[in-house]
Image (cartoon, grey):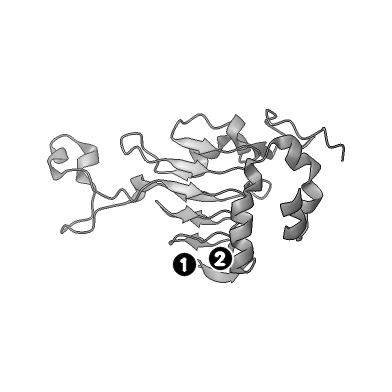
Amino acid sequence: MDATTYPDRQAIYPVAGHDKLVFLENVVKNPNIQVGRYTYFDVTGTPGQRAEDFEHQNVLYHFDFIGDKLLIGAFCAIGSGVRFLMNGANHAMDGISTYPFAIFRHGWEKAGLPDGHRGDTVVGNDVWLGFGSLILPGKRIGDGAVVAAGSVVTKDVPPYAVVGGNPARIIRQRFPEDVVARLLALAWWDWPIDKISRHVALLAAGDVDALERV
């Protein structure tokens, strides 16, 4: 690969002839959803869905009056059917009823809106979210993590962990703890794109020592 070339970050459909995959930052309009460079969403396994409809079909219960954010890092791979439940899905459970009376107004607003804000949902950099995984409100997924297909993320996921199941549990760590620390210090996803382009072969390999020398 010529070190001076790299995919067009501004391309909505970066894979020629394939309109099921988009660079998300070019299609998301909601200011409460922030997506890093080169993160893609692929709907190949979901017939009838357009990838550009991500913020409407895959980010659920995301209400302006709550104000929570979905923050997704750079170079993430988001598989078909991945969904994010936002804080609007929460119901208060400390009263007699969990019914959200207040949202219907007309006198019911005196019940008060539920205090169920669990914070912003944060996905780190270089994260792979597998087919059909579900991320619950306010969860944080660390850099380099992998979420297996069909998993339900109910707890924060450490960097470079592989998690799976319902609820998702750690299956293994991708690298030893000392290597994870080195990778987080490298933060290759913050490099200039021409530097990343020159070293994609190293990034796709497993030689951390070599990567540290570039």
Q: Nearer the viewer, residue 204 or 70?
A: 204
Position of 139 relative to 37 (above/below): below
Residue at the front extreme? 213
Residue at the right extreme? 2
Look at discs 1 and 2 and give the one toward the viewer: 2
User: Residue at position x 56%, y 51% from top?
Assistant: 82
SS at mark 1?
loop
Q: Is residue 57 visible?
A: yes
Quadrant in which the N terminus is drawn: top right
User: Residue at position x 57%, y 55% from top?
Assistant: 132
Image x and y of residue 30, in percent: 47, 31
In the figure, is residue 10 to the left or right of 109? Answer: right
Q: Say which residue label 2 marks.
A: 163
Q: Say which residue label 1 marks.
A: 167
Image x and y of residue 28, in percent: 54, 32
In the figure, is residue 157 to the left or right of 23? Answer: left
**Count the marks: how many?**
2
